[in-house]
């Protein structure tokens, strides 16, 4: 069986995602953008059940999927969803001394992410998640 294309081109596709997000965030470096990516994914993950996290992860491209599950403590207490402003503040506080995320980090990442996922598969996955989780990744105009 051949290697699935999503794995064969995982690095290339992740690089393109990071560059698109870097430009949207107006970051100087890819390191700043990676920090935002990890922070947004962690803030979201903290609010999901294990079942919902697996559903969501399965709809992500491979490298984002790996970042989403990396260094996961499944015993960490789940947090409730909150206002977009408070969730964005949590993103900014994830690694407070190394964070360059704007107040719109979640919305910016959601906007860019939709261009790098299989939209139908992502929509199906989000439809199986709670309303607050769907709202977190709501499709926005680019």
Image (cartoon, rainbow, N blue to C red):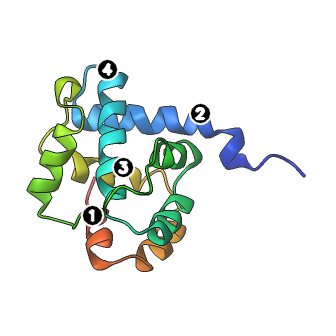
Q: Position of residue 89 (x, y in %)?
A: 12, 46
Q: Could you say which disc has been placed on residue 11 in the image?
A: 2
Observer-side mark, 2 or 3, equals 3
Question: What residue do we see at 45% from left, 56% from top?
Answer: 74
Identify the mark nearer the N-term, 2 or 3.
2
| First in residue order: circle 3 vs circle 4 | 4
- Give the foreground label among 1 and 3: 3
Left or right of 102 on screen, residue 25: right
Q: Residue furthest right?
A: 1
The residue pinned by badge 4 equals: 29
**Marks 1 and 3, how far apart at CA:** 11 Å
For marks 2 and 1, the one nearer the N-term is: 2
The answer, for residue 35, to whether it is visible in the render is yes
Pointers 1 and 3 in contact (C-beta within 8 Å): no
Mark 4 nearby-residue class (10 Å; few <14, some 14–19, many ≥20): few
- 124 and 47: which is toward the camera: 47
Residue 141 coordinates in the image, percent (x, y) = 26, 58
Q: Which of the two discs, 1 and 3, labels the residue nearer the N terminus?
A: 3
Marks 2 and 1 in Cβ contact (< 8 Å): no
SS class, disc 2 = helix
Q: Secondary structure at mark 3?
A: helix
Q: In the figure, 98 relative to 142: above or below?
A: above
Query: In this figure, which residue is indicated by the disc labeled 3?
Result: 41
Horizontal and vertical percent position of residue 15: 50, 31
Looking at the rendered structure, which numbered label has been put on residue 6?
none
Mark carried by residue 136 = 1
**What residue sits 50% from the left and 56% below the top?**
117
Is mark 2 in CB contact (under 8 Å) with mark 3?
no
């Amino acid at each position: 069986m051949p290697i699935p294309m999503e794995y064969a081109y995982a690095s290339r596709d992740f690089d393109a995602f990071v560059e698109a997000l870097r430009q949207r965030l107006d970051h100087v470096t890819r390191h700043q953008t990676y920090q935002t990516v990890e922070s947004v994914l962690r803030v979201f993950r903290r609010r999901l059940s294990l079942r919902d996290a697996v559903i969501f992860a399965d709809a992500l491209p491979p490298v984002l999927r790996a970042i989403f599950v990396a260094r996961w403590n499944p015993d960490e207490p789940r947090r409730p969803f909150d206002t977009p402003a408070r969730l964005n503040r949590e993103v900014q506080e994830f690694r407070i001394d190394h964070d360059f995320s704007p107040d719109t980090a979640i919305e910016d990442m959601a906007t860019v992410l939709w261009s790098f996922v299989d939209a139908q598969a992502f929509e199906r996955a989000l439809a199986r998640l709670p309303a607050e989780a769907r709202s977190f990744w709501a499709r926005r105009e680019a």
